[in-house]
Amino acid sequence: MILCVYIDVVFIANFIMDFTLLKLLEKMRKKKISWKKNILSSGVGSFGACLIYLLGYGKSRWLSVLGVWILCQLMIFLVYGKQNLWWNIYDVLLLFTLSFTSGGIINYLYYETGLEGFLEGESILFTMTAFFLLSLFSYFLIGKIIHIIRKQEKLISYKVPVTIERQGKKVKMQGYIDTGNRLYEPVSHKPVILVEYDFVKSLFTAEEIEFLDFYLKQQGEVGEDFNLNPMIFRLIPYQCAAGNTGFFICVFYDRIYIGDKKEKKEKGYMALQKEKLSPEGEYEVLLHTELI
């Protein structure tokens, strides 16, 4: 039996896979890879895979594995440059893991869905298009799983440093990720965080502080003379798990920075609370899960 291999098809298939895997590695590491570096690394990886196939076919599998390991190290170097040896090993192992996962998804879809029989006898172009679509599907599926894992990791780390910015002023506090916080501003439907008023008092003007002190002292009952400025303040209804209802007074903030890496979120609302949010003073902000 004569096995006919189109080396250009092998190159294209490997290029698609390498490009996809490097994009997934970028998601896993959260370390940006430029398109140019990705294309260069994928091209080198595909060319190397063709060489390994041609030179190593029918010979020792261990030599082929060693060649793939060296090739992966070179690909990592091309996208991330010189880095710590352990990070290189970590990236290569991650690349192998992503490769096995993506390959498993593609093989399952190819053999278990009847696609193998459907593509039999079709042109190379049609088959490669199908392979590209399968690779794209595996990319989005694995990417979605990575996104879910990252989100859960953040939810597990309940306490995070928080910086709130308003009108050029900043305040640093300790935040707590509250999975029960479902507050939204009714008009814009932006998520609302709950903040201890005393900690953010420095963000307001003297006139605003005078009004807020009075409002919070009266527990929201300001009477008919109250003239609410919708550009600055909003009243947002709430209902506790115990059944208590009322209104929070909310103020627009310009930016909020969450976590050690200071992930920036743009404009939103903070509901002001006169009482302490935690008995031991462990945190001063209850964050909305949508901001994480």
Image: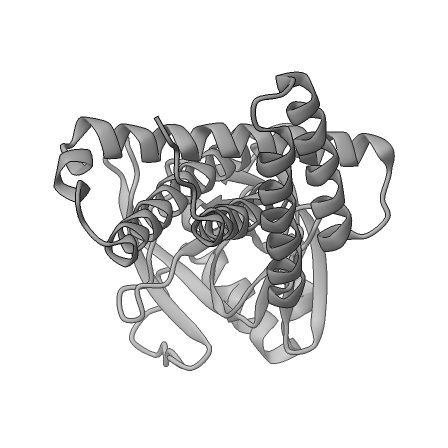
Q: Quadrant of the rendered structure where residue 93 is?
A: top right
Can residue 175 be seen in this snapshot? Answer: no
| Residue 161 in the figure: left or right of residue 134 | right
- 155 lies above or below 275: above
Q: Quadrant of the rendered structure where residue 110 is?
A: top left
Q: Quadrant of the rendered structure where residue 49 is?
A: top right
Q: Foreground residue, 65 or 193?
A: 65
Instruction: Name the residue: 71% across, 54% down.
Output: 79
Instruction: Name the residue: 49% across, 48% down.
Output: 7
Q: Foreground residue, 228 or 50?
A: 50
Location of the N terminus (image quadrant): top left
| Residue 93 in the figure: left or right of residue 113 | right
Q: How is the image coloured?
A: one colour
x and y percentages locating residue 129 in the rendered image:
29, 56
x and y percentages locating residue 142 in the rendered image:
41, 39
- 58 lies above or below 244: above
